Image (cartoon, grey):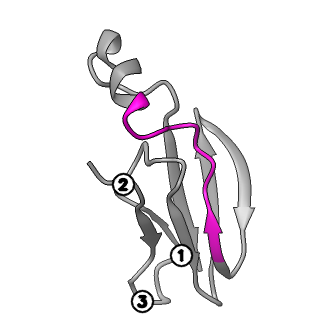
Amino acid sequence: MVITDVIKYEGDNQTFVWKHPAEDFNMTTQLIVHESQEALFFLNGQALDLFGAGRHTLESQNIPLIREILNLPVNAKTAFHCEVYFTN
């Protein structure tokens, strides 16, 4: 089990919007946004924050280990679904 993830966009500047493939990451996940980008953080379908260039810690409410126990009754689906979209 990964405790801390790093989310960043490694592609070219020609892509306008890109959704990071990782979802439902832990609350200690680090988000790296490059100078020419912004990142939009969604939690449970709501856009919560727009991040500019820099390194940010995401607050997703998905706590490692506890998340595994809480997800047992719902077939391992988290109650705190989160996604990140990058824009250039």
Stretch of the chain drawn in magenta: 55-66
Task: Name the foreground residue: 61 vs 14.
Answer: 61
What's the residue at 62%, 80% (across, down)?
A: 37
Indicate which disc residue 12 carries: 3
Q: Whole-percent x and y of residue 19?
A: 45, 60
Q: Which residue is disc 2 drawn over?
A: 22
User: Please, what is the three-letter code of the amino acid marked with disc 1?
Assistant: Phe
Q: Secondary structure at mark 3?
A: loop
Q: Whole-percent x and y of residue 27?
A: 54, 48
User: Please, what is the three-letter code of the amino acid marked with disc 2?
Assistant: Ala
Mark 3 surroundings within 10 Å by alpha-carbon count, few (fewer than 14), some (14 through 19), many (20 or more):
few
Residues under numbered marks 3 and 2 in contact, where contact means CB atoms less than 8 Å apart: no
Q: Nearer the viewer, mark 3 or mark 2?
A: 2
Q: Secondary structure at mark 2?
A: loop
Q: Which residue is disc 1 drawn over?
A: 16
Split into 4 quadrants, where in the image is the C terminus?
Answer: bottom right
Sequence-wise, the earlier of marks 1 and 2 is 1
User: Please, what is the three-letter code of the amino acid marked with disc 3?
Assistant: Asp
In this rendering, the answer to whether 74 lies above or below 68 is above
Q: Whole-percent x and y of residue 13?
A: 50, 89
In this rendering, the answer to whether 34 lies above or below 87 is below
Instruction: Give the alpha-carbon distance from disc 3 to disc 2, as whole Å.
Output: 19 Å
